[in-house]
Image: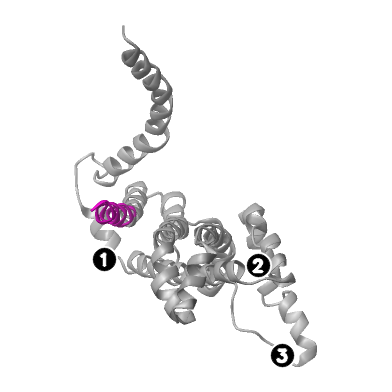
């Protein structure tokens, strides 16, 4: 047995346990969910649960609500995260140092604790309303048990990671490159759109992809802060499964969410492959 064969066997022995774990934890449940979503109570294959998913008023409202919430949250997360990353990259002072020390804190706060903190802060009788009451503000816009509260929670959970990714990409841009652009007369907007954005948009796609998948599959914050109707798909799927015990419809909902995330992942991978081909030529 030559050296290459031994190295190949050793490499397979390292990969196989991880692959088997992936099959058991991820691939097998996906296959079982897909199979169950196409079977009725008699075991016959049918599309009735997917038809119900898109024709039932309640479920279709949940789908539109989830997509709207996800798109708004992702856009807000990327814009705020990009602004923070740029501010930390090109500014100095105590405020910048304070942001650098504190912006990662939400990543280490459990989602349940953060959700209850948002409820106590922005609820009808929360700390915000108590602070504003002496100023003559007797009521504030409804935030808790509304989609605005879920967006607020999504910002809390996703901005730190997005900012960290974009700050890492921005730190890789040499100062000499920025100074050279200034020397030839480029303004701030030209530097941003023609230099910074092209050099960081791959990282931005990574941030968008991870934020999209995390937000569309969110459960804790939407369950605690969101409205009773419509609901995000994760909460609706739990209710369909546990309350109404419609396991096939819950499986169809899970498969639909998986397809949405797969499309997002496909778009990301396809874009990266195209860029690699262009750069190689």
Q: Say which of 243 and 116 sits in front.
A: 116
Q: Which residue is mark 3?
A: 137
Asked if the stretch drawn in magenta spans residue 271, the answer is: yes
Give the Cα separation between the discs numbered 3 and 2: 19 Å
- Considering only order in the chain, which callout, 1 or 2, is on the residue closer to the N terminus? 1
Residue 180, position in %: x, y?
47, 71
Residue 92, position in %: x, y?
67, 71
Residue 215, position in %: x, y?
47, 60
- Direction right: furthest residue: 134
Q: Say which of 176 and 212 sits in front.
A: 176
Q: Which residue is mark 1?
A: 55
Q: Is residue 163 left or right of residue 134?
A: left
Q: Quadrant of residue 240?
A: bottom left
| Camera-nearest label, 2 or 1 | 2
Report whether residue 241 is seen.
yes
Q: Name the residue located 57 percent from the left edge and 60 percent from the top edge.
A: 157
Secondary structure at badge 2 equals: helix
Q: Which residue is mark 2?
A: 118
Q: Name the residue located 31 percent from the left edge and 14 percent from the top edge.
A: 5
Give the Cα separation between the discs numbered 3 and 1: 43 Å
For disc 3, the neighbor class at 10 Å (few under 14, some 14 to 19, many from 20) is few
Q: Name the residue located 60 percent from the left edge and 83 percent from the top edge.
A: 141
Is residue 239 depicted above or below 2 in this figure? below
- Direction top: furthest residue: 1
For disc 2, the neighbor class at 10 Å (few under 14, some 14 to 19, many from 20) is many
Asked if the stretch drawn in magenta spans residue 181, the answer is: no
């Amino acid at each position: 047995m030559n050296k290459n064969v031994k190295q190949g066997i050793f490499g397979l022995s390292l990969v196989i346990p991880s692959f088997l774990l992936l099959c058991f934890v991820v691939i097998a449940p996906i296959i079982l969910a897909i199979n169950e979503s196409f079977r009725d109570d008699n075991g016959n294959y049918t599309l009735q649960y997917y038809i119900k998913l898109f024709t039932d008023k309640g479920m279709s409202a949940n789908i539109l609500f989830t997509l709207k919430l996800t798109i708004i949250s992702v856009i807000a997360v990327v814009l705020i995260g990009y602004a923070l990353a740029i501010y930390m990259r090109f500014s100095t002072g105590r405020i910048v140092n304070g942001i650098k020390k504190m912006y990662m804190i939400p990543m280490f706060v459990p989602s349940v604790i953060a959700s209850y903190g948002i409820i106590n802060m922005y609820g009808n009788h929360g700390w915000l309303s108590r602070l504003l009451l002496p100023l003559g503000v007797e009521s504030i816009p409804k935030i808790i048990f509304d989609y605005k509260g879920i967006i607020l929670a999504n910002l809390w959970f996703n901005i730190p990671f997005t900012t960290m990714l974009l700050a890492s990409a921005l730190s890789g841009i040499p100062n000499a490159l920025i100074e050279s652009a200034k020397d030839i007369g480029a303004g701030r907007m030209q530097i941003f759109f023609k230099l910074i954005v092209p050099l960081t948009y791959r990282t931005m796609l990574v941030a968008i992809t991870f934020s999209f998948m995390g937000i569309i599959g969110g459960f804790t914050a939407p369950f605690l802060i969101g409205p009773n109707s419509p609901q995000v798909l994760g909460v609706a799927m739990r209710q369909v499964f546990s309350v109404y015990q419609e396991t096939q419809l819950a499986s169809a909902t899970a498969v639909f969410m998986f397809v949405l995330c797969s499309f997002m992942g496909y778009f990301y991978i396809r874009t990266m492959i195209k860029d690699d081909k262009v750069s190689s030529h």
